[in-house]
Image (cartoon, grey):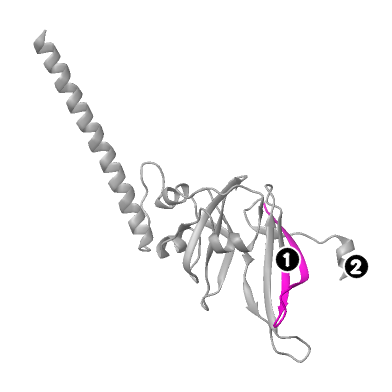
Amino acid sequence: MDRKITIVTLLLVLLCGCRQRSVSIEELARMDSLARLEAGEPEASTAYGTAAEDYFYELKVRLLPLRNSETFLRMLPNFSDVPVGIASAVFGIEDMSDVKAVRLPDYRNFHMALVAGRDAEGVKTLSLVSLDASCHAVDRLPLYEVTSAGDDEDEQMGLWTTDFSMTSNYEIYIMRLFVEFGKDEPKLQDIDEYGVGDDGMFVLKAKPQAVLNEE
């Protein structure tokens, strides 16, 4: 009887050891795959998916609807830092620094994410990115950006900026605003509505006739 117990115990120890070894090998492979992606090297497939998928599925999820605010842009709640190699390979972004991202609910067959960063002049930007099933960028829609206005005689000096809101059905509204230097209140200049096409591309919707007549 004692001999049987000893053999069973031995088998359990061996099985546990094999299981721990298997998990460790899988985790090491995953870490190596992500490291290659961060370094900009071609990604390798793992037993569960690509390195891009491994990275994307680890992002925190931000639920919709969403309305932009000064606090949201300043805090970027639940956003995660994005290494340079991953910013390019996953989100198709190569022209920004200090990149951060948060995952949004999927839309039809596409993954969605918000990606924030700073442009070449250090100005904060925020974009909506659609991704295919393999977690690679399909299209990118700027939601928030700030640009300087020209100094033509018929144009007041100031800044152009955008504001946005988004419904749970991905009805995306982008407001174009002008902030004149020396004044606090921005003036609304235009509103565009976007949707997501069957191919994952962002589509500008036609404006209602009433709005066109007002313009």
Tell whether 113 sits left or right of 16.
right
What amino acid type should be assigned to the residue bearing mark 1? Met
In which quadrant is the C terminus drawn?
Answer: bottom right
Q: Which stretch appears magenta?
A: 175-197
What amino acid type should be assigned to the residue bearing mark 2? Asn
Q: Give x and y (percent) for residue 42.
A: 37, 59
Task: Please tell me which residue is depicted at 66% across the width and 58% down the height of the picture.
Answer: 202
Query: In this rendering, is residue 3 above or below 15?
Result: above
Q: Give x and y (percent) for residue 36.
A: 34, 58
In which image quadrant can residue 191 be found? bottom right
Residue 11 is inside the magenta segment = no
| Mark 2 burial class by Cα count in 10 Å: few <14, some 14-19, many 20+ | few
Task: Please tell me which residue is depicted at 44% across the width and 60% down the height of the picture.
Answer: 82
Report how many numbered discs are placed on residues in the image.
Answer: 2
Q: Main secondary structure of the magenta part?
A: strand
Which residue was labeled with disc 1?
Answer: 175
Task: Please tell me which residue is depicted at 11% across the width and 16% down the height of the picture.
Answer: 6
Task: Please tell me which residue is depicted at 20% across the width and 32% down the height of the picture.
Answer: 17
In which image quadrant can residue 74 be found? bottom right
Q: Give x and y (percent) for residue 26.
A: 30, 42
Which residue was labeled with disc 2?
Answer: 213
Tell whether 76 sits left or right of 194.
left
| Residue in front for this viewpoint, 69 or 51 | 69
Q: Give x and y (percent) for residue 212.
A: 86, 66
